[in-house]
Amino acid sequence: DDVTSVEAASGDTEYRCVYIKNTHGTLTALGTKIWIQTQTPSADTSVEIALGSSAVNGTETAVANENTAPSGPTFSSAANEGAALTIGDLAPGAHKAIWIKRIVGAAAAAANDSFTLRVKCDTNP
């Protein structure tokens, strides 16, 4: 979402939960992992990721609001494949929760920010 001028002036940390899902009908995603392929271009912002606390196919516990950190997950900068977070195997149709933490530093300059997450796995034919 957009960062307001008040949030940019004082700094802001927000959290979002997304789910990685294996949409293949028959193949298991083996050794699935995720990392931040491209960090935000702004020097005033960054993102970190964490695996959700719920099991594969589980649902994360809701947080009070976007400024409330989820209980349990440990966030990481996971800046390359070597530092990737390991999701593990995802059977066809299975999903796993991923938390995203966006950090906006105090006195952040206006920017058109973005980032890219990368998910990788293997399969057996």
Image (cartoon, rainbow, N blue to C red):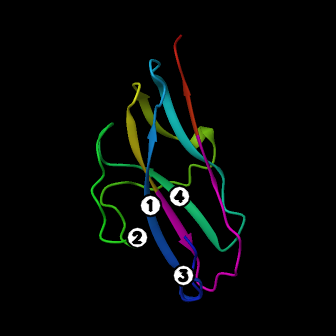
Whether the magenta-drawn stretch holds residue 10 is answered as: no
Above or below, 16 against 23 in this view is below
Residue type at mark 3: give it: Gly
- Circle 2 packing at 10 Å, graded few (<14), some (14-19), many (20+), is some
Task: Give the number of the disc on residue 84.
Answer: none
Q: Residue under circle 4?
A: 48
- Residue 28 is left or right of residue 70, and the answer is right
Question: Of tags 2 and 4, which is closer to the observer?
Answer: 2
Q: Residue under circle 2?
A: 66
Q: Position of residue 47 (x, y in %)?
A: 56, 61
For the record, the magenta segment spans 100-118
Quick one: label 2 or label 1, which is nearer the N terminus?
A: 1
Whether the magenta-drawn stretch holds residue 109 is answered as: yes
- Nearer the observer, 100 or 76: 100
Question: Of tags 3 and 1, which is closer to the observer?
Answer: 1
Q: Are marks 2 and 1 in contact (CB under 8 Å)?
A: yes
Above or below, 100 against 7 in this view is above
Q: Residue under circle 3?
A: 11
Residue type at mark 4: give it: Glu
Examine the image and state in which quarter residue 2 appears. Answer: bottom right
Q: Residue under circle 1?
A: 16
- Residue 81 is left or right of residue 56, and the answer is right
- Nearer the observer, 108 or 110: 110
